[in-house]
Amino acid sequence: MDKDSFFTMTPERRVQEVNRLLQKYELKEIAALIGIPYSTFTKEMRKGDYFYHQSDRKYYRFIRDEEEENIKRKYGDSEVLSFIQENFDTLKALIQHYQSSGFLLLDERVYRSNATFVNKSIKMNSEIYEEFSKFCEDNYPQYRLQDLVAQALIDFVNKYKK
């Protein structure tokens, strides 16, 4: 971050960048890295109602009691919102990957440690079984066939439950 970008950033973005730098540097070192006097740095950092919390070594937005209730009502938990904003690109890529690849999530009941297992024999069409087995092997080799069959049964029950 240079002097020009520091002064042209929004206060929110500036705080994010400085908080990231605070993991490695002190405030005075950051001001020197940017190339501005420490007093100017701290004055700029207070814009947008931000303050430095010394024990956390982090800038936070100062929220007055009335504002806090309105913000919580409108946006929910600020930590959650911050997490989503910070990880937006990753979350977006994960959702796109899920939608394009048919990402599979197994129900907890399939793999929980205290589950009881039984052997059952069922007759089924060999073509259907071969197609299912090949599909599972090609697309989900990390799972055991018994787990995928169990998940298929759960999905069937959930889909056709009245």
Image: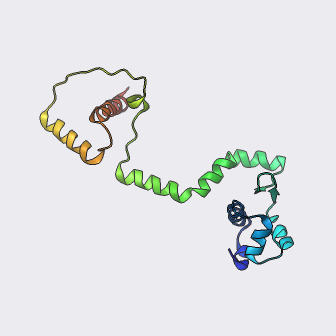
**Quarter of the rendering containing residue 143:** top left
Percent x, y for residue 56?
77, 52
Apparent side of residue 62 relative to residue 93 in the rendered image (left or right): right
| Residue in the image at 27% along x and 35% along y | 145
Visible residue check, residue 7: no
9, 39: nearer the viewer? 39
Q: Quadrant of the C terminus?
A: top left
Apparent side of residue 55 relative to residue 22 in the rendered image (left or right): right
43, 64: nearer the viewer? 43
Percent x, y for residue 69?
77, 45
Give the residue furthest to the right: 39
Does 151 appear above or below 97?
A: above
The colouring scheme, among rainbow, by chain, secondary structure or one colour, is rainbow
Percent x, y for residue 107?
41, 33
How many numbered dots are placed on residues in this image?
0
Q: Quadrant of the N terminus?
A: bottom right
Does 73 appear above or below 1?
A: above
Percent x, y for residue 115?
39, 23
Does 104 appear above or below 58?
A: above
**Quarter of the rendering containing residue 125:** top left
120, 80: nearer the viewer? 120
Give the residue furthest to the left: 126
Visible residue check, residue 91: yes
| Residue in the image at 77% along x and 74% along y | 32
